Amino acid sequence: MTLSRWGFANYAAGAHALGERLGLPVSVLSSEGNSQKQFADLRAQIARTGGNMVVNIDPNEGPVIAVQGMLANNAAIGRFKGLQKALAENPGVELLQWEAADWDTNRAYEVTKQLLAAHPDVDGIWSANDNMAIGAIAALKETGNAGAVKVSGTDGIPDAFDAIIDGTLSSTEFMDSWYQSQLGLTMALAEKNGDLDPSTTPAEHCAFMISGTQVNARR
């Protein structure tokens, strides 16, 4: 059994205990610090890409609002940092206000209504995930601005793809967990077959970034 430590420190201890119970060897493919840093960098890059979809409004300037996730959540922190990076790269775009909606669609709907009441002339809405983006779109529909105001999300849920087709969502980011699992299982099989020795494999060959592909059309 091969473990890539993308979560918390006790994952490794739990995996070793399970391995002993099942009589299976356990290898740690990357250190906690290295994995967590790469995961944080990934979250920020994902949000930066989504943020750019919102802040790159014609003519690359204008006001936007943001809907955050749970404030103490690592994913929410990383994604908001990504938005801030996108804003820094586009100084003509101003973030007027943000509010937390705790990853929840209904909460995001209520939060967005409040934000729109305070800032009715925004050009874009950044959302930390797709569920909240759907809630933001529902609020925009009530004001007659769905589709006119750019909205971005993250996660690639089916409702988000439908919203993109409808023209009410400008973008989402999809992380391919199947492909990630495939890579991990491939490395585990390589170790089992004697083709990989985790103890001598450099960290960058155990925990690495998968390059993204921008999709702008549907076949």
Image: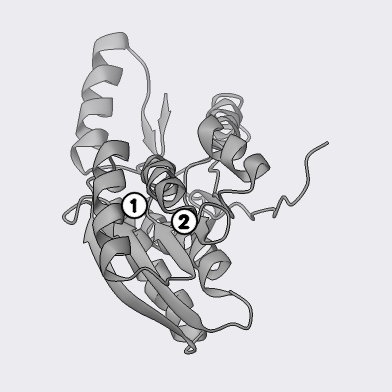
Quadrant assignment for the N terminus = top left
Residue 64, image x, y percentages: 41, 72
The answer to which of marks 1 and 2 sits earlier in the sequence is 1
Q: List the residue tagged with mark 2.
A: 203
- For label 2, the crowd category at 10 Å Cα-Cα, with few meaning under 14, some 14 to 19 and many 20 or more, is some
Residue 106, image x, y percentages: 28, 37
How far is mark 1 from mark 2, CA to CA?
8 Å
**Residue, far top:** 22
Residue in the foreground of this view, choosing between 82 and 219: 219
Q: In terms of image quadrants, where is residue 122? A: bottom left
Quadrant assignment for the C terminus = top right
* Picture residue at 60% right of the left edge, 35% below the top: 162
Q: Are marks 1 and 2 in contact (CB under 8 Å)?
A: yes
* Picture residue at 43% right of the left edge, 62% below the top: 125
For label 2, the SS is: helix
Question: Is 25 placed above or below 81 here?
Answer: above
* Picture residue at 29% right of the left edge, 53% below the top: 113
